[in-house]
Image (cartoon, rainbow, N blue to C red):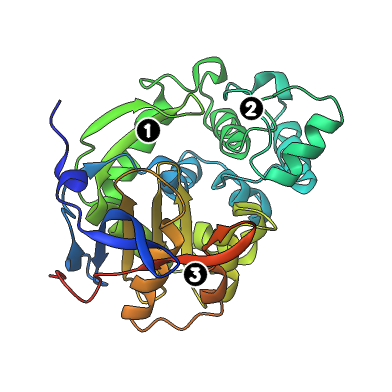
Amino acid sequence: MPTPPALADAPVLAHVVRGGVVESAHRASVAVTAPDGTLEHAWGAADDPVFPRSSNKPVQALAMLRAGLHLPPPHLALASASHSGEPFHLDGVRAMLEAAGFTEADLQNTPDLPYDPQERDAWLAAGRAASSIAQNCSGKHAGMLAACRAAGWDPATYIDPQHPLQRLMDATLEDLTGEPVAATAVDGCGAPVMAVSLAGLARALGRIAAADPATDEGRVADAIRSHPEMLGGTRRDVTALIRGTEGVVAKDGAESVYAVGLPDGRGIALKVADGGQRARPVILAAVLRRLGVASDAYTRLEDAPVLGHGAPVGAVVAVGLDEGAA
């Protein structure tokens, strides 16, 4: 198969520097949309479809609300989450399931260990096996089950691409991105994942971030802003970004995707071509700086040391963002 333009045409936007020498380079594509949804800046093929992976989750949570689901803000943030598997995350998932009349046995996401390394080590030390509730998408799956209950849909088939909830998620993504879904596949958790362009993903997050608080979009934004620890975790860069940047809505995704909505309606979406995570927050920080966004999270986002014998001898640094923008 040919390499998609979002990967093949991606410029080098990060260097891995060791001892003053560039050791490796990461290519990435970035889209920045204006408050009206038009493309404002682009590096690489911003209109080429990619799988946003978990960066789609705020839009999927919106679809749950459109299905008639009502959740308190902490649980709505958890329904939008790729959580770290900390105890408060798992307690939240259990509470969501119980409120809708379900148990952990009803979750259909892929069993896994907690995402956070410290929580994973503690889980294994306690002799626990991989489980669906520990997997980082269990909040989304609990939310999908609860949405099925609210809408009167069959919960047994909720991850089938033809299920009414998945069709609503498809339609909601098309509504927020302003473009048709280009492809559908199976995500790591077992649920469908829909492909859209980086420009569309940026547009969707910008619309959520700028939404009227009384709307469903605004409810998703408020939940994420109010409970960023539920969206990520105690030690996650996405949590630091939301907590440290006024009005922002953000979601990280597998294969090195990041999507951000700014309170003025601008949106940002990026994809590192090789799927490696180490350059993702560094590139995002450089884009935010270029846009003049004030944030207390830059230190955390840009903390990407290169180690030699256990000590910092270099860093992952952003490059090329002053070139090639539309």
Check disc 1 and report its element: helix, strand or loop: strand
Check disc 2 and report its element: helix, strand or loop: loop
Check disc 3 and report its element: helix, strand or loop: loop
**CA gap, disc 3 and disc 2:** 29 Å
Frontmost residue, 255 versus 174: 255
**CA gap, disc 3 and disc 1:** 29 Å
Relative to residue 181, is residue 246 depicted above or below?
A: below
Q: Amino acid at mark 1?
A: Val
**CA gap, disc 1 and disc 2:** 19 Å
Where is mark 3, residue-wise?
302
Residue 167 % position (x, y):
35, 29
Relative to residue 15, is residue 102 depicted above or below?
A: above
Frontmost residue, 149 versus 247: 247
Q: Amino acid at mark 2?
A: Asp
Residue 190 % position (x, y):
48, 24
> Mark 3 or mark 2: which is in front?
3
Residue 125 % position (x, y):
84, 32
> Mark 3 or mark 1: which is in front?
3
Where is mark 2, residue-wise?
112
Residue at the (73%, 38%) spot, across then down: 120
